[in-house]
Every structure is written in C-alpha cells, then in structure tokens.
Amino acid sequence: MTIAVAPLVLKDWFGTNVRDFLCLNPVSISPQPVHALSMFVARTTEIRGQRRLSDLAKVVATKNGLWAVSDEDLRSHVRYQLPPSDSDLEQLRHSLAGLLAADRAVFQGTYSFQLAHVGLANSDRTDHYLGVLASRLVLSRPDGRQALAAVIRTGPSPPSLSEHSAPM
C-alpha cells in the first residue's frame, strides 16, 4: 500500500520562528556594521520629524562608480535646496558621500548612512536582523532605554586609568 503525503514546506514556519523570533537569518554574506548599527538605533530610539532620508540617499547614491541619480533628476525630485551650479553640486555630493556613505552602502532603494547623527538611522533590512537582535537585547533590560539615551547624549565614557592600572 502506498500513501501519498504532501511535501513538508517549512519556509513560513522558519520565517516566523527562526528569522522573526530569534533574529537569525542564515546568509552567505556578512552585513556591514553600518547596517546593523542603523537598524539598532532606529529600533531603540523614537526619532520624530520629517527627515527625508530617501532624498538624501538620492544625493549620495552611486551605481557602478557613478552617481545613481543625475544632477538634472536630482534637482527635479529632491525637496532639499541644492546649489545652482553643477560644480558646487558635485562638491556637495562628494562631501556628503564622504561623510554619510564612506562604505558605499547607499543606494537609491536601500541605504544605511554612516551615523554621523542619530537622525540618520533608518530601518534598512540589509543588516540580516543583527540590529533587531541587538535592540531586543538592550530593551529587554529595565534600564536599557535610559542607558542607551545616556550613550547617545554624551557618547561612551572612556575607561578611567585606575581601571587599567597594574596593582602596586
């Protein structure tokens, strides 16, 4: 006697139980730290206001070593006030790219800026859930949000010399 059974499909189960719950995503490439840090800050802070990060991404996004958005398209689609001359706009783009996209991880559709300011954090999913995991760990502590706010406000404290001095 032959019994036919339906194939076992684990994709939905895996997505819910492993990827979403445990924040693990088996991948063959490693995410850049900037992606995980951006997602972490976005998940652990309450950033308000209109930031227009997608417009900023258009200014610095590259493709095959060139600007992904032409100067003409940039001027017609971006809501920021841009320099009127092409040379000034080029200088602005290079300056911003050096500050915000030093790792060249900024594209038109997905972007994680270098966090020169906490307001640049966004929920870019290319971190393979590492930022989500880190945010869950920090926020699982009762004092996690306060500790994070103190670090953002003042920066990490340097270790004191007495902590690293050899006993006499």
Image (cartoon, rainbow, N blue to C red):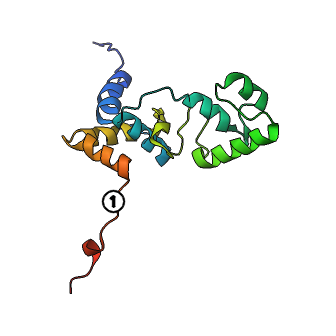
- Does dot 1 land on a helix, a strand or a loop? loop
Residue beneath the point at 78% across and 33% down: 84
* The N terminus: image quadrant: top left
Q: Position of residue 104 (x, y in %)?
A: 62, 45
56 with respect to 145 (left or right): right
156 with respect to 143 (left or right): right
Residue beneath the point at 47% across and 37% down: 119
How many other residues sit within 10 Å of disc 1, few (<14), some (14-19) or many (≥20)? few
Q: Position of residue 15 (x, y in %)?
A: 36, 27
* The C terminus: image quadrant: bottom left
Residue beneath the point at 31% across and 45% down: 148
Which of 14/139 is in front? 139
Which of 142/153 is in front? 153
Q: Position of residue 77 (x, y in %)?
A: 69, 22
User: Residue under circle 1?
Assistant: 157
Q: Is residue 46 visible?
A: yes
Q: Amino acid at mark 1?
A: Ser
Marker count (numbered): 1
